Image (spheres, grey):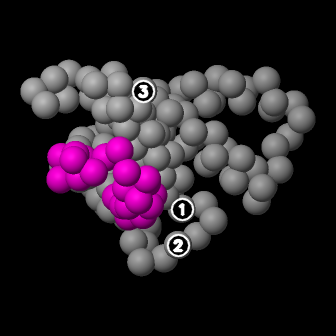
Amino acid sequence: MSSEPIHGVKSFWLSVAIGAYTGITLQFLLASWYEPIDFSDLWAIPLILIIYGLFAVPFVALGLAIFGLPVTHLLYRSARKSWVGVIAILWSAVAGKLLFFAVDHLMFFGQYEIAKIQLLDMGIIYGLPTGVAWWLLHRRELIAI
């Protein structure tokens, strides 16, 4: 059990990368659903995804550290059980909303409504893939121990 934090470092950063880049990709796809992309701007898509994904990394890491690691510690003994995946899905969506609410009110315009769920819900878009990736990757590491 003492090796648990060492094994979790790899899963943590991989989950953060998956969450940040899946989040920005989903954000981009959902935003383009509302406002289609001009064909002449297609060249910029990879650059936008890379830059905004890098911008999202510290926030995703903060969310996983604040909300994911404590729950992981609480459910450590049950991490191999599949029902924990349901908790990971629900908690990561809630945690994403909580973190994005805080970030929006501290750094941006404070327009994000925590009680409202929309198609382009930034908290869920970033929180859900991060939490699910963390659960799957960390679970895989625990099984290998």
Residue at (63% x, 46% y) in the render = 26
Magenta span of residues: 72-95
Q: Decide which of 85, 91 is in the foreground and name it.
A: 85
Measured in 3D between alpha carbons, the distance from the residue under mark 2 to the one under mark 3, in whole angstroms, is 27 Å
Say if residue 63 shows up in the picture: no
Q: 78 or 54, which lies in front?
A: 78
Point 37% across, 51% down: residue = 81
Task: Give the numbered dot on residue 121.
Answer: 1
Residue lying farthest to the bottom in this orientation: 115
Q: Which residue is mark 2?
A: 117
Q: Which residue is mark 3?
A: 14
Residue 13 vs 85, above or below: the answer is above
Q: Where residue 99 is drawn, which disc sits there? A: none
* Residue most extreme to the left: 2
Please indicate whether residue 130 sits to the left or right of residue 141 in the image. right
Q: Secondary structure at mark 3?
A: helix
Disc 3 residue type? Leu
